[in-house]
Image (cartoon, rainbow, N blue to C red):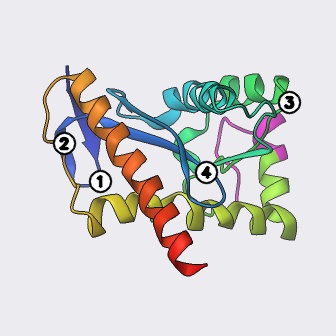
């Protein structure tokens, strides 16, 4: 079931673990994908998060979806906005001074303008302090840097168990602090 995926360290046989988290770093959706690029995962992950929230009795849609540049895909962003979900996704992987050739206009230019404002840049910086620590906790602090099971359904179960135990640990630490 796994695929050869391109990573920052080269190619690896595996899966692409995805998570949607709240502002409080609670995982509300966890899935695995065989897509090397994250662009294919934005809309399915938000839909999964909405389904999980609805199952938990939360009817309101997410306020704002924040994601890094790897999730940029015009069609997915437009579909989410059409559902009333605001998105703030960096259109460029780095802080380019000039727009990318061939991407000018429309949603690309609009998002670049929003990210250039104080409000947009402050909101977007929250992404780094919201979702990245969840992956850091799971991978580095808990030592789950690779899946131990084989097959996509088994890996999906393992990833969801890791996400659930992450949430339980957050809840436990929160109760200890209060």
* Pointer 2 or 1: first along the chain: 1
* Element marked by disc 1: loop
In this rendering, position of residue 26 left or right of residue 152 = right
Circles 4 and 1 in contact, beta carbons < 8 Å? no
Separation (CA) of disc 4 from disc 1: 17 Å
Magenta: main secondary structure equals: loop
**Direction bottom: furthest residue:** 177
Quarter of the picture holding the N terminus: top left
Residue 68 appears at what percent x and percent y? 57, 51
Q: Which residue is mark 1?
A: 8
Does the magenta run of residues contain 114?
A: no
**On the image, which quarter does residue 159 sit in?**
top left
Residue 92 appears at what percent x and percent y? 61, 51
Instruction: Identify the mark at residue 162; answer none if there is no mark.
Output: none
* Pointer 3 or 2: first along the chain: 3
Circles 3 and 2 in contact, beta carbons < 8 Å? no
Q: Which residue is mark 2?
A: 147
Q: Which residue is mark 4?
A: 92
Label 3 or label 2, whichever lies nearer to me, is 2
Separation (CA) of disc 2 from disc 1: 18 Å
């Amino acid at each position: 079931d796994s695929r050869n995926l391109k990573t920052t360290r080269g190619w690896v046989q595996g899966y692409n673990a995805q998570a949607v988290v709240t502002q409080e770093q609670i995982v509300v959706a966890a899935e695995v994908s065989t897509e090397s690029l994250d662009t294919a995962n934005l809309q399915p992950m938000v839909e999964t998060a909405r389904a999980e929230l609805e199952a938990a009795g939360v009817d309101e849609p997410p306020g704002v979806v924040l994601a890094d540049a790897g999730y940029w895909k015009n069609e997915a962003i437009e579909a989410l906005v059409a559902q009333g979900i605001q998105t703030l996704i960096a259109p460029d992987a780095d802080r380019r001074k000039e727009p990318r050739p061939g991407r000018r206009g429309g949603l690309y230019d609009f998002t670049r303008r929003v990210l250039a404002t104080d409000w947009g840049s402050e909101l977007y910086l929250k992404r780094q302090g919201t979702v990245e620590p969840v992956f850091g906790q799971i991978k580095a602090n808990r030592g789950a840097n690779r899946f131990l099971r084989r097959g996509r359904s088994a890996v999906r179960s393992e990833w969801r168990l890791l996400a659930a135990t992450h949430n339980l640990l957050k809840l436990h630490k929160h109760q200890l602090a209060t």
